[in-house]
Image (spheres, grey):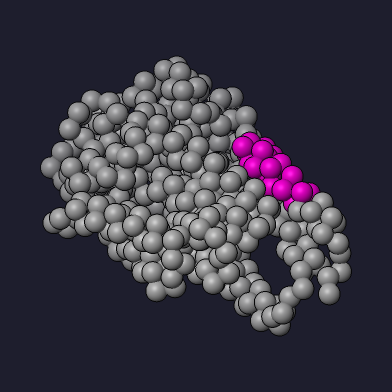
Amino acid sequence: MTLISADWAAALYLAAAVCFILALKGLSSPRQARRGNLLGALGAAVAMVTVFLSTDLDNLAAILIAIAAGTLIAVPVSRRVKMTQMPQLVALFNGVGGGAAALVGLLELDHAAEVGSSLAIAFTILIGAVSFAGSCVTFAKLQELMTTRPIVFPGARWVMILVTALAVTSVVAVAVTASMPLAITLLVLGLIAGAMLVLPVGGADVPIVISLLNAFTGLAVASSGLVLGNILLLVAGTLVGASGTILTRAMAAAMGRSVAGILFGAFKGGSSAGSTAIATDRPVRSATAEDVAILLGYAQRLIVIPGYGLAVAQAQHTLAELTVALEARGVEVLYGIHPVAGRMPGHMNVLLAEANVPYESLLELDDANSRLKTADVALIVGANDVVNPAAKNSPGSPIFGMPILDVAGAKSVIFLKRSMRPGFAGIENELLFEPQTTLLFGDAKETLSKVLSAVKRT
């Protein structure tokens, strides 16, 4: 016996869908992102409660146990995860969503009444499996459980073509026969295809694949909505699929590459992962924290370029404190944010917001480049590939064509680095050897603390 009528359930589902749409709108702006997240959570809560109130559930105890188990796992993990591990967490969440959609497809196959339903189920199984396996491989790469470099074995291209052809054939076969053995075969083929899709991707391309797999999961969820006859799942999945696709294309454009080139470039040597060799025989100019403090203290305009190293060192609060001290001395401080800085879209924005850096101080790529031409100092904290001149000057470089923050336009460049190791793309940065570049070696949080102390003393 249900507690509410079908009409009330439809109205509540509509309210949840509106919450999802408003959440997506809110997430388009850092200023409104927190409210967007809360609206999305509210929509999910309304949708879940509506299911319990409008459905005659036969396995209520098992469902509640599953929810409790998921909560006991997810809440501690989400609360303890470091900002540097957020992309891995997103990959895991995304994979779980795709895997759940694939399992829903398998369970619903026995209830398929016509070819159209079987086709939707087959599509759900395939895309969900691809998303699950691809997300697991992405997690392993980001967590450094395996190499982040492209993995390509002899004949990989032909194996991928064969697996794809078999998967498409299996989709048609499952749609026609509604056969469970064929559906399980399709699931296995989807898992293989998902892993093989991500293995050849490496370096700075990995975060883009997260966004693409997120779009895949959205498609799988939307298809499962068709299978279950649930309009809310269809709407939510379509929103995730569309937004993930748009974000993937935007990030690929920010890298100056095509999505196809990112996914399959390693087959012809086009990945963004290069050599990991360390240059040891070329001189660089290094300085002490006191030297850097003097240079910063007498600047009129400072533009900070944050990167993944800032997140690793958890130095965002120290950086914000330093910039406040410099602003008190009359220095104009701005932040240049590259679209793919860090390991996921918006990574740097989240870090800086956590340190209460005003959103008005954050500059997007084009605006930052125009300001860099008149900057006295560009302070690079943990970034590397997004300021590498090889993207503009070296046609043979794997990141050639990627738009970068043109810090060479500033009068002076201060580069905070742990060592001379290359960035995530694994290629040497010629900016380190330019005459206007000064290097300050060490952990970003420690070196920034020393610079802050020196600024306060001067």
Residue in the image at 55% along x and 60% along y: 114
Residue 30: x and y in percent read: 63, 39
Quick one: 221 or 445, which is closer to the camera?
221
Please tell me whether residue 248 belongs to the stretch shown in magenta. Answer: no
Quick one: 29 or 356, which is closer to the camera?
29
Quick one: 440 or 270, which is closer to the camera?
270
Residue in the image at 64% along x and 48% along y: 235
Please tell me whether residue 25 belongs to the stretch shown in magenta. Answer: yes
Residue 287: x and y in percent read: 33, 38
Magenta-colored segment: predominant secondary structure? helix
Whether residue 215 can be seen here: yes
Residue in the image at 72% along x and 48% along y: 17
Q: Quadrant of residue 380?
A: top left
Say which quadrant the N terminus sits in.
bottom right
Q: Which residues are magenta?
A: 14-36
Whether residue 143 can be seen here: no
Q: Is residue 220 above or below residue 380?
A: below
Residue 212: x and y in percent read: 44, 47
**Left or right side of 361 for 213:** left
Residue in the image at 62% along x and 29% along y: 360
Residue 303: x and y in percent read: 48, 29
Q: Is residue 412 above or below residue 265?
A: above
